[in-house]
Image (cartoon, grey):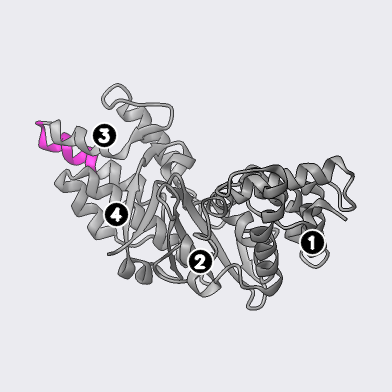
Amino acid sequence: MRISEISVADLKKQLDLPKKTDPRVMRRIVDLIDQARGGEEGTPYVRVANSLKQLGEVDQDIKKFYKVMAKQMLGNDVSSKEIKKIIKGISDNTLINIAELKSVSSDMSKIVPMYNDSIQVKSYFKDMLMFQPGQGIGPGEILFATHHKDLSKPPKGDLRILSTQEDIEIKGGIKPGRFSDNDVMPGPEFGLAVDAFLKKYKGTIKTGKSGISIERAVEAGKQMTDPAQKKALYDDIYNVMTKIFTNGGYEQKLKQAINSGNGERVVDIHGLRNLQQYFGAKPKEGVLFMRGNVDPALTSYANTLEELLQVANIQVRQAYLGVIKEAFPQISATPKQ
């Protein structure tokens, strides 16, 4: 007989332990005794990994990451009962609520119904949410792909719903995301325009490794006393910015914000132009915004910019005229209350 077949209550009596001994401590004792006696199923890790590996026979994402999942479960002290519930939820396709995942306003406790089952379970899902095994893989991608059989990590992109072939881009995590990839790049004239701008204003406006901050450039214009000089700078800023997102729209609002000297407003409109071009380039792809620095992590899902603006507040920051990557601002979305 394996020691694990003895009830926890009987084991407490035999070991003369207090009645209030944490069940998780008892579980560890049972596992260690079984391991020492050469339990048929091996160590706790082997037992959990083997159970997950079986799911991996029909799920390529689990096949890749079942060892990580097992280590995270045991590392977060998830109980055997909870592990079985997680595995059953994956098998039954009930662990991830896809409807909540695609909701305009949700959070991890709604997307993962088990999220608040215990502190240990919550820690497991939080760790898996932030698990990023390599460059180009962001928060949430592996968690969702490995915990529902209808969700997968595609060769290109972040997440795919297999039954409908819908693609989902996940943005955010701890830091806001940048909306740039091979489908959303600056216009062909941007390089020459920004080089000319940096050359012209080097020494006049503080320049860093990323280029010139858009807010700093606009602020520099406010300090100019010569109207012609100010107009020339603002025209140059507008010229460069319109060559970043050639299909971003909002040109009139952008020009008005620049000419008013409102750098913060300029950056906000720059972010809207980025999003407009992004959604336009990917008409069949939804975007899941995730704010991972709160618990539970907040999410907003949208298929169009108009849909997103109805349900979420957009925050835009760190936009530069210079290095291509930094021309794309950091953008986050927070569900409206």
**SS for callout 4:** helix
The answer to whether marks 4 and 1 mark residues whose Cβ atoms lie closer than 8 Å is no
Task: Report the residue at 64% width, 55% height from top.
Answer: 142
* Residue type for callout 4: Ile
Which mark lies nearer to you, 1 or 3?
Answer: 1
Q: Which residue is mark 1?
A: 56
Q: Which residues are magenta?
A: 225-234
* Residue 69 in picture, x, y percent from top left: 69, 51
Quadrant that contains the N terminus: bottom right
- Label 4, label 2: how many angstroms apart (C-alpha)? 31 Å
Magenta run includes residue 233: yes
Residue 111 is labelled as 2
Magenta run includes residue 78: no
Which mark lies nearer to you, 4 or 2?
Answer: 2
Task: Report the residue at 87% width, 49% height from top.
Answer: 39
**SS for callout 2:** helix
The answer to whether marks 4 and 2 mark residues whose Cβ atoms lie closer than 8 Å is no
Residue 88 is labelled as none
* Residue type for callout 2: Ile
Query: Mark 4, residues whose alpha carbon is within 10 Å: few (<14), some, or many (≥20)?
Result: many
- Label 4, label 1: how many angstroms apart (C-alpha)? 45 Å
Which mark lies nearer to you, 4 or 1?
Answer: 1
- Label 1, label 3: how many angstroms apart (C-alpha)? 52 Å
Q: Which residue is mark 4?
A: 269
Q: Is residue 157 left or right of residue 6?
A: left
- Of labels 4 and 1, earlier in sequence is 1
Query: Mark 1, residues whose alpha carbon is within 10 Å: few (<14), some, or many (≥20)?
Result: some
Quadrant that contains the C terminus: bottom left
Q: Which residue is mark 3?
A: 216
**SS for callout 1:** helix
